[in-house]
Image (tube, grey):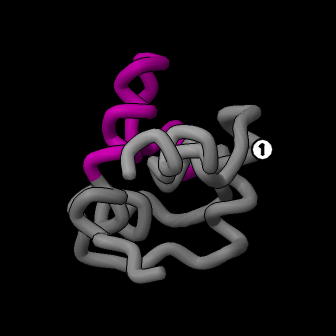
Amino acid sequence: MVVDTFKLGNRLRELRENIHATQQELAEALEVSHSYYSRLEEGRRGMTLKTLYRLVDYYDTDANTILDIPKKEERKRGR
């Protein structure tokens, strides 16, 4: 599966804005630099698995939600 970094960046921004957090707050929570997190949201940087795991933990959700991947049932209905 190929991940569109721009789409992922938009998703990260959407999730962050939904909880009214700043990029700096997210960067600190994920233990990454502000510039790295900013580049993720801009779609200019790929995400490491370590960062994905930290996002899953931070948002208390699953990777599919972070990556905006529909669940199997939703994919089957879309066929």
Q: Which residue is identified by label 1?
A: 57
Nearer to us in this view, 76 or 34 = 76
- Residue 31 part of the magenta segment: no
Q: Residue 55, position in %: x, y?
A: 64, 50
Find residue 61 and report its image quarter: top right
- Residue 17 part of the magenta segment: yes
Q: Is residue 77 above or below residue 8?
A: above
State the residue at coordinates (46%, 40%): 77
Q: Residue 14, position in %: x, y?
A: 33, 33
Q: Residues within 10 Å of mark 1 (few under 14, many from 20)?
A: few
State the residue at coordinates (35%, 45%): 11
Q: Is residue 19 above or below residue 73?
A: above
Q: Is residue 70 above or below residue 18?
A: below
Q: Secondary structure at mark 1?
A: helix
Find residue 44 and report its image quarter: bottom left
| Left or right of 10 on screen, residue 46 | right
What amino acid is at disc 1?
Asp
State the residue at coordinates (48%, 81%): 1
Q: Is residue 10 above or below residue 60?
A: below
Nearer to us in this view, 44 or 73 = 73
Looking at the magenta stretch, what is its main secondary structure? Answer: helix
Number of marks in picture: 1
Nearer to us in this view, 24 or 73 = 73
Nearer to us in this view, 74 or 16 = 74
Q: Residue 19, position in %: x, y?
A: 48, 18
State the residue at coordinates (45%, 26%): 21
Q: Residue 62, position in %: x, y?
A: 71, 45
| Left or right of 34 on screen, residue 52 | right
Find residue 51 and report its image quarter: bottom right
| Left or right of 6 on screen, residue 74 | right
Which span is picked out in magenta?
A: 10-27
